[in-house]
Image: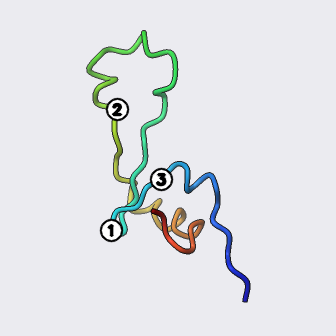
Amino acid sequence: MPKLKTKSGVKKRFKMRTDGTLLHKKSGMRHGLRKRSIKEKRHDKGFFELHPSDIKCIKRCVPYGLK
């Protein structure tokens, strides 16, 4: 049976923890940041856990896991 390919969009957008939970970055942090408050921008930095209902769909796109 041939190897399965990983969806390239998924490997660019998500990180996986050792316990299997997935992390993602918030959207809207590329441009147009002047109109947002400093507090909003600070709270949207970094990685956030993905909702458990979405994890099943994303893991199907990554058959061998993420780094």
Residue lying furthest front? 67
Quadrant location of residue 20? Answer: bottom left
* Disc assigned to residue 44: 2
Q: Are marks 3 and 2 in contact (CB under 8 Å)?
A: no
Q: Is residue 3 left or right of residue 10?
A: right
Percent coordinates x, y for residue 11 in the rendering: 55, 56
Work out whether mark 2 precedes mark 1 in sequence or the reverse, and give the earlier one: 1
Q: Is residue 3 left or right of residue 62?
A: right
Quadrant (top left/top right/bottom left/bottom right) for the C terminus: bottom left
Q: Are marks 3 and 1 in contact (CB under 8 Å)?
A: no
Residue at 62% in and 52% down: 9
As measured in the structure, the alpha-carbon distance from the residue carrying label 3 to the one carrying label 2 is 16 Å
Using the rendered view, name the quadrant where residue 38 is placed.
top left
Residue 33 spot, x, y in % from top left: 44, 16
Quick one: label 3 or label 2, which is nearer the N terminus? Answer: 3
Whole-angstrom CA distance, mark 2 to mark 1, is 23 Å
Write the residue at 72% across / 89% down. 1
Q: Residues within 10 Å of mark 1 (few under 14, many from 20)?
A: few
Q: How is the image coloured?
A: rainbow
Residue 45 x %, y %: 34, 33
Q: Residue 40, relative to residue 19: is it above or below?
A: above
Circle 2 crowding by C-alpha within 10 Å: few under 14, some 14–19, many from 20 = some
The type of residue carrying mark 2 is Asp
Residue located 39% across and 53% down the image? 23
- Residue carrying label 3: 14
> Element at badge 2?
loop
User: Mark 1 — residue?
Assistant: 18
Q: Residue at x 51, y 68 (%)?
A: 59
